[in-house]
Image: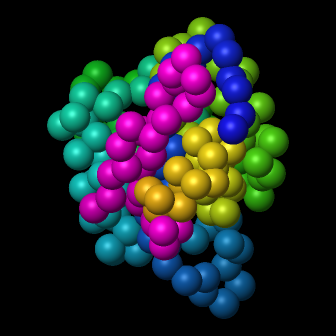
Amino acid sequence: MTSISPPPSRIYLLRHADAQHATPGQRDFDRPLSDDGYAAAEIVADKAADKDYKPDLVISSTALRCRQTADAVRRAMTPAPEFLFVDALYNATLDTYLDIISSQTTVNSVMLVGHNPVIEQTLEALIGHDALAAALPNGFPTAGLAVVDATRSGWILKEFLTE
């Protein structure tokens, strides 16, 4: 398991919602959410807001589907948290995701809105393989939100939200 200190003490990992397939000539980066994806992003964002899961900072990939998923979070949370859009989260490595999280030393909680397989790899790095396999035996679904808390002994998965 990965150690990150000082803060954040809570990490939210949100995989973008379901996206449309690329049309001929369309870049993967520019794929928008599908209709089901829009609905799922809204449902998960609303569930998070209802549970008072509100990050201090949301850091999203600049890919269209991630920006649209992050927009659902912005609409669900009042007042809206601070948002940053970071190119480095698109086609990133696990080390990039962990570096971005660990560089957030002025906030208590941070949400990453990103892509698989790296969102799942980040969760696994934080909570360990066994905990990941127990919590998500079928993998990290689109529009899935992992809420991960720091404890004295490491990171634990507090809750996993899906539509």
Can residue 139 be seen by looking at this rendering?
yes
The C terminus - image quarter? bottom left
Q: Position of residue 28 (x, y in %)?
A: 68, 72
Q: Which residues are magenta?
A: 137-163
The N terminus - image quarter? top right
- Which residue is located at x 63 percent, y 46 percent? 128
Compared with 31, 152 (above or below) is: above
User: Quadrant of residue 25 in the image?
Assistant: bottom right
- Which residue is located at x 32 percent, y 31 percent? 53
Q: Position of residue 108 (x, y in %)?
A: 50, 15
- Which residue is located at x 52 percent, y 24 percent? 150
Can residue 69 be seen by looking at this rendering?
no
Q: Nearer the viewer, residue 129 or 12?
A: 129
Q: Nearer the viewer, residue 74 or 53?
A: 53
Looking at this view, name the residue that lies furthest to the left.
Answer: 50
Q: Is 141 included in the stretch rendered in magenta?
A: yes
